[in-house]
Image (spheres, rainbow, N blue to C red):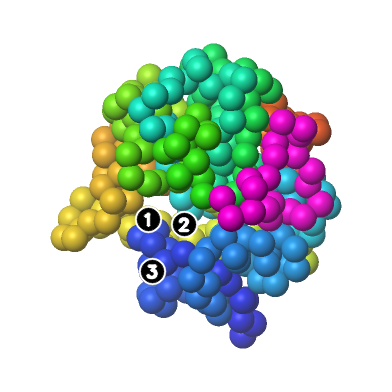
């Protein structure tokens, strides 16, 4: 039986795959543990080091645009709310970011940053082109070149400190003493956006090396069964993580972890819109071209 070298974070919806209680048909997953998951993302897009890999959605969009031989499956492993990802020292406001410098943890194409900038543009009217985005790291897709208003942080800098001292007006994806969400009551605002607009951002999906796309339906089925078991036991988890608690609350409104293109079409389209408007993508890809053909009609 073929063993597929696989990397994915150990979390509720993948646990049954990791402990072996759910297994795919015709092959097996050979899991490699990568302590810092974003390191696996870089290895996957640069070297296609794994057969099956969890990957940030925008990293995949960027990788696909640059011809990387990987194909996505509509298995959306991680979701999140990003109103609270934008932090400041208490002296800024969203409307006051234009003409100023705003930090971004790691690269410009990091999915949390893409969603957070989209929220600033769509819900608070920020002209993203009038902000200078200051990066603390590099891009997963080495060939990508960001727009001119994206600059690297000076060597030895620290985004949290730069926000605290006023050198940066705000930052995305950082924490530190005295830093608070730029959006007041960010958690409640995010859940209201879910209830009102269906805004439920996708962060991570699953990709395979192109030559393994023929196994896509079976990979999907295994991940879907693991997810089903997790959602079934979610209300009774005795020691829930913060992610468990988030999914519990989401389940009061909608499926906390829908897999498949159809139930996620609005969020897929919106993330692509953000990527085009933020000049991560030069052109808009067809959604059906992003996913393995055998998975286009699958849902779970």
What crowding class fits label 2: few (fewer than 14 Cα within 10 Å), some (14-19), or many (20 or more)? Answer: many
* Labelled pair 3, 1 in contact (Cβ < 8 Å): no
Residue 77 drawn at (x, y percent): 48, 53
* Rendered image: mark on residue 224: 2
Any magenta on residue 213? Answer: no
Q: Residue at x 68, y 53 (%)?
A: 138
Any magenta on residue 147? Answer: yes
* Range drawn in magenta: 138-157
The image shows residue 110, relative to residue 206, as above or below, that is: above
* Rendered image: mark on residue 16: 3
Q: Is residue 241 left or right of residue 15?
A: left
Nearest to the observer: residue 112 or residue 244:
112
Q: Is residue 90 left or right of residue 66?
A: left
Q: Residue at x 51, y 26 (%)?
A: 119
Task: State which tag comes first along the sequence, 3 or 1.
Answer: 3
Q: Residue at x 54, y 77 (%)?
A: 32
Q: Is residue 250 left or right of residue 2?
A: left
Disc 2 and disc 1: Cα gap in Å? 6 Å
Residue that badge 1 annotates: 228
Residue 251 drawn at (x, y percent): 30, 40
Callout count: 3
Q: Residue at x 19, y 60 (%)?
A: 239
Task: State which tag comes first along the sequence, 2 or 3.
Answer: 3
Residue 256 drawn at (x, y percent): 37, 43
What crowding class fits label 3: few (fewer than 14 Cα within 10 Å), some (14-19), or many (20 or more)? Answer: many
Mark 3, secondary structure of its residue: helix
Mark 2, secondary structure of its residue: helix
Disc 3 and disc 1: Cα gap in Å? 10 Å
- Furthest residue to the bottom? 1
């Amino acid at each position: 039986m073929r063993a597929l070298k696989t990397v994915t974070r150990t979390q509720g919806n993948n646990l049954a795959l990791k402990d072996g209680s759910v297994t795919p048909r015709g092959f097996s997953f050979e899991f490699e543990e990568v302590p810092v998951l974003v390191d696996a993302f870089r290895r996957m897009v640069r070297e296609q080091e794994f057969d099956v890999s969890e990957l940030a959605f925008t990293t995949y969009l960027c990788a696909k645009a640059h011809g990387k031989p990987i194909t996505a499956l509509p298995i959306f492993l991680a979701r999140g709310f990003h109103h609270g990802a934008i932090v400041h020292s208490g002296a800024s406001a969203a409307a006051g970011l234009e003409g100023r410098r705003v930090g971004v943890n790691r690269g410009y194409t990091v999915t949390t940053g893409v969603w957070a900038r989209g929220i600033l543009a769509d819900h608070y009217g920020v002209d993203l082109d009038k902000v200078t985005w200051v990066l603390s790291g590099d891009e997963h897709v080495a060939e990508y070149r960001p727009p001119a208003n994206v600059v690297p942080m000076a060597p030895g800098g620290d985004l949290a400190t730069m926000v605290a001292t006023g050198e940066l007006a705000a930052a995305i994806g950082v924490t530190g003493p005295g830093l608070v969400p730029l959006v007041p009551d960010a958690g409640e605002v995010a859940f209201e956006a879910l209830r009102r607009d269906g805004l439920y951002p996708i962060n991570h999906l699953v990709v395979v090396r192109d030559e393994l796309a023929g196994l896509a339906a079976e990979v999907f089925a295994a991940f879907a069964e693991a997810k089903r078991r997790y959602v079934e036991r979610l209300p009774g988890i005795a020691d829930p993580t913060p992610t468990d608690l988030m999914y519990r609350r989401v389940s009061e409104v909608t499926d906390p972890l829908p897999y498949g293109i159809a139930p996620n079409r609005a969020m897929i389209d919106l993330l692509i819109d953000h990527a085009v408007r933020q000049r991560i993508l030069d052109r808009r890809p067809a959604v059906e071209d992003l996913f393995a053909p055998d998975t286009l009609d699958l849902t779970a």
